[in-house]
Image (cartoon, grey):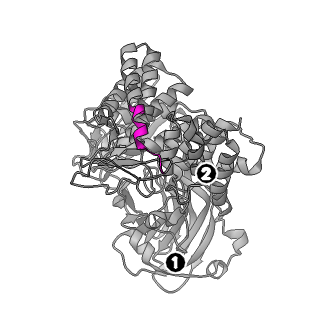
Amino acid sequence: MDFIWLKEEENNSYAQFKANFDYKKGNVKLSVSADYKYEAYVNGVLVSNCQYADLPTYKSVDSVDITAFLQKGNNELTITAFHMGEDFSSCRPQTAGVAFSVENEGKTLVKSGEDTLCRKAKGYRPGGIITAQLGYGWNYDCTDEGGAWEKARLTKAENTLVPRPIPALAIGEPMPVVVCAQGIFQYREGKTAGEKAQNAWLSTLRFAGMTGKNKITSADLHVPVTFKANGGDGVFVIVDLQKETSGYPVLSVTVDKPCKAIFAWGEHLADLRIRAEREGRNFASEYTFKKGENAFAGYIHRLGCRYLCLFVENDEVTINTLTVREATYPFKMPKKDFGDRLLNRIYEVGRRTMQICAHEHYEDCPWREQALYGMDARNQMLFGYGAFEEYTLPRAVLRLQAYSTREDGLLSLCAPSRAKICIPSFSLYWAIAVYENAQVDYDEAFVKEMLPYADKILENFKRRTTEAGVTCFKEKDYWNFYEWSEGLDGGTIFREYEIEETTDCILTTLSFMASRGVAKLYKRVGDTAQAEKWLHYAEKVQGTIEAFYDKEKGLYASFIKQGEKYGWHAHTQAIVLLADIPEERKDSLCEVLKNPDGKVVDMTFAALQFKYDAIVACQGDINWCVDDICKLFGDMLFQGATSYWETALGEADFDDAGSLCHGWSAVGCYVFDKYLK
């Protein structure tokens, strides 16, 4: 397939392609690939979207049977694609391009080429940057009927094409909604759509007063509802999707004259409105409406949200549809019953949390970032082995991360991006995850493919290993992050200077775990020399863990700098408990994990797996772990959560930017599957 694009390549631009073909009989397959995101239609019906996150050297091609969408005679294929021309956490810019072919049982009916017609995409306009992780959003002009079609040009993209490594997403029907607020608004200040929505004066009015309808029977928008009001800049309406979700926006509104609108999305109404802007983030898009009905269904940009809001600069608007079509990875959902309604509910919400944090790869959260991090992904695949009995997605993710490694052999901060910085410990989590994947579903060819990447990672840590342990990465462009707790958050993320050298207990222990696992994998594939090499290193680095122990405190220090031990964290005690420390210390350290107050800095959700595994391994106290999970995550459920939060502080954390759906918080699924059999 040839990749094509518009005559001019512009960063952050939308292009539309059109091809016609004749059909008589037989099965027909569409193959399509895009540099970033696309949506493909046959005879006006969506048939494929969601380009796999990839690299030019590993370029994914989607293949879909489109026979059911064809008619005898002439058929039309249209593809709208978005080219992201800048680096963000969720993408690595590639040469702008789309490639496609339509095959009828081996015969090519049409394919991309210089005769393919193209134009700037109808309606779509580049929007502002949503977040530094997600990149640019969209605006949409319903008055735009599209410009003149012209012939495409061949691009110079040098791609190695491969079949899509995971199944396509399942896109559900439009989700049911309930109108939860309505009224009039007045814009005050703001340059972006998000700022305008966040800062607008809102005056809420009664549903019946604005619509003349009974809220009980009409607020679900099962039929169109007209909202009328005088005053301000127009009418706003907020709808509740009734649970946290991730999917594609669908809206249809009717207005009696041309006007502008802002569409915003968010996870909560803590501000009595959608939090459309926070510290430069921009969870909103601008629309231009024509007189009459205006419909939009966008399958390029995926939202993470529970609430939607529409600000319409008119004193009358009819809402026909305002919702999301949920997009989910087709996980299996094996039946689970732990004999207790609360445990079952905790498990199911944990499983849903993971489900809406997995699409073309694992995501830390569907709202703010949709980014693939090493530690987050390791947690999600580990938690998901029991919850979904899924092995295809974990291996695809591990491979994508391997293919995205930097020149120094460590993982990029987020695959497939090429961020300036990286988190060294996340590369060790990747090596541990490769080992864990082999334990649940061994694939020797995959293991052999991954082991050379593990070698490069471990060599980095071997070079930094001293008699006192593994030293931190003091050079710029390395962020020594472990979790969002005081002292383990890695300090300044972007810096142009070297930090003081410290010896690092968590990095030392992770190096032991990773090298031990890699040694076992080499032994299993029959490479005894490499197995012995990494086993010897594992034994050496394990022997240095004792350097961090403080007899007076009875704890392991997180760091040593110039001979001084400092940093007392629950995370550190939990991870060393899994590294075969002296038996007589285990019980007291477990008690510290159970009651850290005043002794150590407690851990956040990201590291809970270590705590629970350590307590069960050393004390066998499964009941305490289950009770702790019930306390932490049951509390969220009683507050109305439909997915688990990034931290216990919820939306208020991270300066009011906390995520209400985070994959690493589904640890209850892991514990219940492992210990409550």
Label 2: which secondary element: helix
Q: Is residue 26 visible?
A: no
In space, the residues marked 1 and 2 are separated at their CA atoms by: 52 Å
Q: Residue at x 68, y 47 (%)?
A: 624
Amino acid identity at mark 1: Val
Residue at 37 percent across and 79 percent down: it is 189
Position above or below: 3 against 495: above
Q: Residue furthest front?
A: 552
Residue 645 against residue 83 in the figure, above or below: below
Task: Report the magenta residues as a range.
Answer: 541-552
Q: Is residue 242 left or right of residue 144?
A: right
Query: Label 1's element?
Result: strand
Label 1 vs 2, first from the N-terminus? 1
Q: Classify 496 as above or below 93.
A: below
In this orientation, which residue lies closer to the viewer: 274 or 537?
A: 537
Circle on res. 235: 1
Spot the residue most to the right: 339
> Label for residue 594?
2
- 496 sits to left or right of 234: left
- Foreground mark, 1 or 2, reads 2
Q: Position of residue 396 (x, y in %)?
A: 45, 32
Instruction: Answer whether labels 1 and 2 touch (C-beta < 8 Å).
Output: no
Res. 29 visible in picture: yes
Q: Position of residue 574 (x, y in %)?
A: 52, 44
